[in-house]
Image: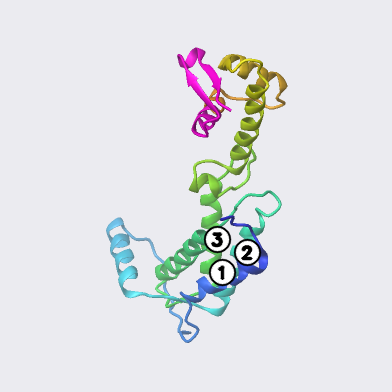
Amino acid sequence: VLDKPDTRTDRKLARHLVSLYYDPSVIKKTESKSRILTIEQLTEYISYCRNAVSPVLSDEAANALVQGYVAMRKQGISRRTISATTRQLESLIRLSEAHARMRLSNVVEIFDVEEALRLMKVALQQAATDPRTGRIDIDLLQTGRSTSHRDKLATLQTEIKKIILESPTPNIKSDIVLGKLVAQSETDISKIDFEEVLNMLVEEEVISLSGDIRSRTIRRLV
């Protein structure tokens, strides 16, 4: 199932998820004063906030969550990457609620959502930035492999398969295949990616491998 960004459906889904946490009948606001706390006091304070406060979303906060989620999704439309999923939206809701709890507020306000969005963006930049493109890619968190890396492996697989199928004999040394691949490729090819693609072709029963990893023989099966 492909998770393709679409502004209309993303907004509709976001509103539905936000509505699960949203109670417009609660309008009461609670003010709090800030001061420096010791570690023990902070621990007790956090425990109290968790148990005593159950904030709900205000109209402004609910709209801000929807708009923030849609904006995050739009970042991936032109690059064929997933920059946010409903999991990130649910995390934004929980972060917004947690921020309101820390203020001892029964209502999640728009500035709670703004802080949740800021924290989410910082976290994604640190954990889900594709080093090849410098862009956020949620696939990197969910699968350990970015969209650009997955596309690169697919291209390598096609090129390696072509070299093997065009070989005049059914057996060919892996270092010969790698040499031809490097000669015709415009990008750097790592030994790790090459070996991973070979293993993928073995799983697909296109080839079999024999011999030591330093000098393996590839046998064509198709």
Residue at the (39%, 73%) spot, across then down: 104
Among the two numbered marks 3 and 2 on one chain, the one whose residue lies closer to the N terminus? 2
Magenta span: 196-222
Q: How is the image coloured?
A: rainbow
In the rendering, at what x and y percent does residue 51 appear? 30, 71
Residue at the (52%, 34%) spot, across then down: 204
In the rendering, at what x and y percent does residue 131 appear? 59, 37
Work out whether residue 142 or residue 204 is closer to the camera in this orientation and state it.
204
Work out whether residue 193 or residue 217 is closer to the camera in this orientation and state it.
217
Q: Secondary structure at mark 2?
A: helix
In the rendering, at what x and y percent does residue 101 appear? 40, 70
Quarter of the rendering containing residue 3: bottom right
Among the two numbered marks 1 and 3 on one chain, the one whose residue lies closer to the N terminus? 1
Q: Is residue 21 left or right of residue 201?
A: left
Q: Is residue 48 visible?
A: yes
- Disc 3 target residue: 117
- Disc 2 target residue: 70
Q: Is residue 7 left or right of residue 144?
A: right
Residue kind at label 3, given as amino acid type: Leu
- The label shown at residue 14 is 1
Work out whether residue 122 or residue 157 is closer to the camera in this orientation and state it.
157
Which residue is outermost to the front?
222
Q: How many badges with numbers are in the image? A: 3
Residue kind at label 2, given as amino acid type: Val
Q: Find the distance from the CA under tag 1 to the CA under tag 3.
A: 14 Å
